[in-house]
Amino acid sequence: MAELKAISEIIKEISPYYQEKGEPEAQHKLVYDSSSEMLEPIYFFILDLMNDFKLAPEKLVDNFTSAPGSGHFAELGQRATIMQQQGDQTLKTIYTILRSVLQILYDLRDFRMRLQSYDDLKDKKKEESATLALKQIWMDKVDMQKGNSSIKAMALSQAGFVTLIDAFLAAKSPEDVNNIDLNDIVKRILKPRLQEFYIWLKESEIELRKRYEIQKNYLKSQVNSMKIYSRWVKPYLRAAQQLEMKDAGRNPNLISVFNTILLELTLLGKNELSIDSLALEGKLPRDFHDEKFIKKLKRKYYSCVLVDFNFRGIPQKVGQHYILGGKSEITFKAYALNNEELEKLSREIDKSDIGEVLKLLEGTTTESLGQIQKEIDYYLEGKEMTEEEAKKEPSKDSSNPFLALIGHYERKEKKEEEAKKTPEELDKPIKSDNWIEREHLRPAVAAAAKGTIFKLFEIYKKAHGMPAFDFYQP
């Protein structure tokens, strides 16, 4: 799986502006080194502060690594194993139900083909061909049970009965046999067989339609069970993935037999640039206040705040939980990004370990089972819709049990423009800023981002009574 790079490195790779600039707009850094100073109060104070600034913070990175010789490593390893085992057992149940669903679909398809012949009997244009088809089925499935005395066995193996199959197919009723030029022996055999066929024709249709409805109800119950199990397995799969430790490599802060833990957290907050307000304030040209000008702009710009937490601590167990004291490094970085850069940043993060796990899971379910979902919808809804009708008409329960595995319904809906783009279009390099963006919009959001991270930094220092000195880097 792909290792997630530092967010600042990803921004530098995807943004033409920061490829040239090479560094964030501004950066501030705080360092604690105290065995009694825990990370939780620091993290939640900054998180709440970002919310107060209406930055809508989003967690991008959440990694940890424990030293193999520590008790923390052993305990989390046991928890991860339990989650994996629970997820594996539930997945096995899901795949068992899935095999059952496949078999039900095959049966329903056969029933539907058979019932089509019964439906064609009511159509005068198709009545003859439908009757012939059902006679063939009766000879193969019912009459063949009589062994050597069946119509086919007698016609193919006994002399004098060569015309028996043709006569059976040609006769429209037992009474119609008298009008066919046949010898008396063939007629005496043919009349009771035709009578048996027409009795079977009536009774088999009733039985087949009954079994068809029972199978449809069974399909519905199995699909509902699969949805339930899919929702149950998701927390175990996510928990197992979240309890996986990052490979520390040659990091000197992590020694195998030490009681040590390393944590990496990254928060991203952003505010959209209000071109109209800044133009009225005189921070942008007055012409930018024009509504037509704003509509012509193809990209939106955001002042972004990136907060990196790096923690090296000594876990100490108190009751059922661990207290983490040690060295904390908090870095505030200011960026000016447009919506295309933010979207590509999100896609790059999805290519990390979490994204690849979800893609593998999605590949084993949704991609390979798309046609099965259509068949399920056909039998449960009772009619087959075209793609255009499906888009216009919402189904009663459009949730896909396979998508539920990966939390698809918890994600935010994508914009229509992005949904229409092909993977090739999404992976295209981002275009450089035009003159207006380079000279006015990017500097405006950069200035706002600088001011925001400085306020966050200063408020945190004053709230904790820290000295005026800091690690500010312009």
Image (cartoon, helix red, strand yellow):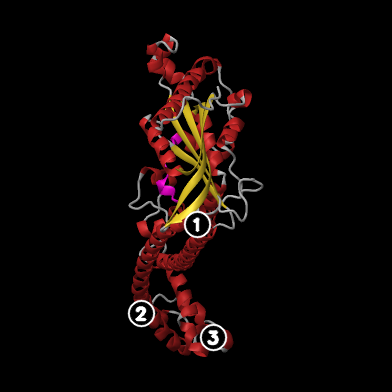
Marks 2 and 1 sit apart, C-alpha to C-alpha, by 60 Å
The residue carrying mark 1 is 240
| Residue at x 37%, y 64% (from the top left corner) | 119
Mark 1 is surrounded, within 10 Å at the Cα level, by few (under 14), some (14 to 19) or many (20 or more) other residues, namely many
Tell me which label, 2 or 1, sits earlier in the chain: 2
Q: Which residue is mark 2?
A: 199
Residue behind mark 3: 153
N-terminal-most mark, 1 or 3 = 3
Question: Residue drawn at (46%, 70%), measured in percent from left and top?
Answer: 133
Residue 297 point in image, percent of width and height: 47, 20
Label 1 element class? helix
> Looking at numbered disc 2 in the image, what kind of residue is underneath it?
Ile
**Amino acid marked by disc 1:** Ala
Q: Nearer the viewer, mark 1 or mark 3?
A: 1
Asked if the residues shown at circle 1 and circle 3 are in contact, with their CB atoms under 8 angstroms apart, the answer is: no
Which corner quadrant holds the C terminus? top right
Above or below 295: residue 41: below
Q: Residue 36: percent from the left, percent from the top?
A: 46, 44
Q: Left of 218 or right of it: where is 162?
A: right
Magenta residue span: 407-416
